[in-house]
Amino acid sequence: MPHTPSPPAHLAWAGGPLGRYAVRSARGIDRRLLGAGPLVVAALACVLVALLRLQSCFATGWSGRTPTTRMCPSDLATAVGADNLGRGLAAYLSGDLDVRQPPLTAAVMSLIGGVTDAPTLLTAQQALVITWAVLAVVLLGLMAVRVATVPGADPTQVVLSPVAALTVLVSPDLLGVALATLGLVAWLRRRAALAGVLLGLAVMARTYPLVLLAVMVAVVLVRDPQRRPDLRPLALGALGGVVAVALPLAWHPGTVISAWRAWWAAGTSLGSPWHVPSLVGTAVPDPLAVALAVLGWVAAAFVVALLLTRRGPAPSLAGLALVAVAIVLVTGTAAPPGASLWLVPLAALAGVRWRDHLVWAACEGAYFVAHWLFVNGLVEHTKGLPAGWYAVFLLVRLAGIAWLARAAVPSISGRHAPTGTLDRLPSACGKPPPVVGDAAYPPVTEGP
């Protein structure tokens, strides 16, 4: 039998499996030194690309039409002046600072804004964006390293995703995304209490981790009853994470719910399919838009239940989570370009193929450009994108998200484990009765 050489050990971080004859070190040194290092370097490269996209605004600031015409907008920089982040965390905790973000995200932004405050607005914006970029390298690298511990996941999709490079500095979503991803990995590694705490903190940074919690509970109740005892520490941990963030704001409860209250009253905005009628002068009423968004959560629950109860192997938890989050994202009242970052680590955990990931990324990139061209056209009609073309690119984005969600569940996309593996054995229909020995069918044998 010819010898099949194994790939070098340092290529394991890139998502490829170890070769047949490769031996992993008992202490895991090859994984720690040759795995985490390249992932962190890739995270640094991703953030540097994101900073390169913002270089025009670094010189001229984030005021006026410069951000939209030069494709360098950032909610992080805009919040410095709009939300007066220079007053710091103490002002936010005392209720004197209204940051239009969920509590944990607002607290972190206020903390960084107070530390990086400067005499001029441009200097303060530059300092906050650079500080957030350093935090982004840490969070992206940590996510990738933890995702690498999950069998079947592809950590390179966290740090090499074009979508991450586009969105990581557009909005503060990365904080909630990182906490939710670490919580999901902790659950997959059977650390229920830690998963609950991380997901509870994530809920206070972004709303979509509630979808992950719901999917996790559904999988346990329908497909994995042996883990039902883990639901109690999961719930207690999640409650503890929420309380840990809400308790310092107990004297100002309006601050805790201000972001969700604003969402309830905001109506539709760009990125949502429910906003398309307003482009032709017929806006969807705000109560109806909220009802459609709630129906999106119901639709996500129905699809997850359908996938869990169908016959055959159960889809992976990460695949189900990606499908549910994608449905909630495309049916919401708002889906800004930065929201696409939610799907990046879920695609990595679900083991989506790079081909499918890049198809989705191409759709997101096309929409990203169209979004800001359309926004610029609202002010200067001769230098913008018409509403009809914006709607076309919005449909392209929605189609890309649907493509990614379909690819995340093998039973939907038609992607299965290769025939002859323990995940999918050859069918014995039409074959003679099995015999003992080399002629036995199916020919499952031990490795060499």
Image (cartoon, rainbow, N blue to C red):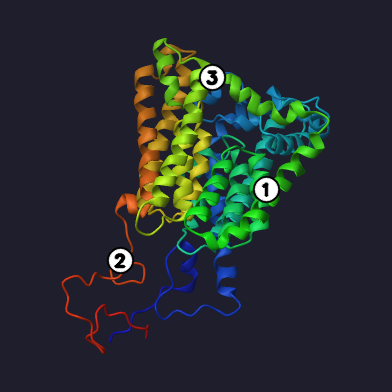
Name which residue type carries label 2: Pro
| For residue 375, above or below residue 142 | above
Tell me the distance, in whole angstroms, between the alpha carbons under discs 2 and 3: 47 Å
SS at mark 1? helix
Q: Quadrant of residue 126?
A: top right
| For residue 22, above or below residue 250 | below
Q: Residue at x 65, y 37 (%)?
A: 129
Query: Which numbered disc, 2 or 3, marks the residue that appears first in the sequence?
Result: 3
Q: Residue at x 44, y 45 (%)?
A: 304
- Is residue 194 found left or right of 386 in the rendered image? right
Q: Which residue is mark 3?
A: 267
Tell me the distance, in whole angstroms, between the alpha carbons under discs 3 and 1: 29 Å
Quarter of the rendering occupied by the N terminus = bottom left
Near-viewer residue (322 or 169): 322
SS at mark 2? loop
Q: Position of residue 232 (x, y in %)?
A: 66, 54
Name which residue type carries label 1: Ala
For discs 1 and 2, the disc positioned in front in the rendered view:
1
Q: Which residue is mark 1?
A: 238
Q: Residue at x 58, y 41 (%)?
A: 210
SS at mark 3? loop
Q: Which residue is mark 2?
A: 418
